[in-house]
Image (spheres, rainbow, N blue to C red):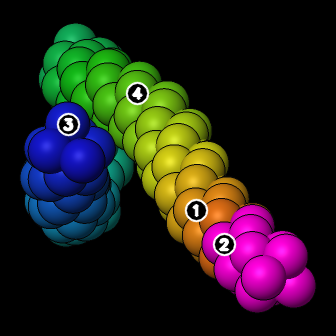
Amino acid sequence: DPELSSAMQQTFLEARDLFQHAANLVLHYAQVARQVSQTILPDLQLAVEEQEPSLAVGLLGIVKTWVTDMQREGDSIRSRYTRLQSSVAALAQKAHSTKMDADRKLADMAQGAARGTDAESAASAEVSFSIQSFTEAK
């Protein structure tokens, strides 16, 4: 089924792109965490020690922006996974439907062939009966 094949290929590409994007996002999250622990936290500690609340608030604002971005990106990935899950479910349903159609056609062909064989057997028996009747009549 060309439609099923095309849908499978599209779903595969969608999944591959999503997995790659998710892997890149995890690497980005690791970079953000490293940046917070190596840069922001030491600067925040210094701001507190130096009694510079505006610097501390500014640093926490930066972290808040990063966390908000990470949440948005995470929500986007979650949404894409939900769509992919729906695509895979639809693909499975289409594959099942295609298989059922093929099985039904195969069964119909087998029944047709069996009927043809039965018809041939009946015709052969009728001819044999006719020949036998003709021979007996002589």
Say which amino acid is labelled 4.
Arg
Cα distance in 3D space between marks 3 and 2: 50 Å
Q: Which residue sits at x=20%, y=36%?
A: 3
Type of the residue with mark 2 = Val
The magenta region covers: 125-138
User: Which residue corresponds to mark 3?
Assistant: 3
Left or right side of 95 for 70: left
Label 3 sits on a secondary structure element that is helix
Q: CA distance from mark 3 to mark 4?
A: 19 Å
Which of pointers 2 and 4 indicates the residue nearer the eye? 2
Name the amino acid, label 3: Glu
Give the number of the disc on residue 116: 1
Q: Nearer the viewer, residue 22 or 8?
A: 8
Task: Assess disc 2: are there few (<14), some (14-19) or many (≥20) residues with their C-alpha within 10 Å of its C-alpha.
Answer: few
Residue marked by disc 4: 83
Residue 137 lies in the magenta stretch? yes
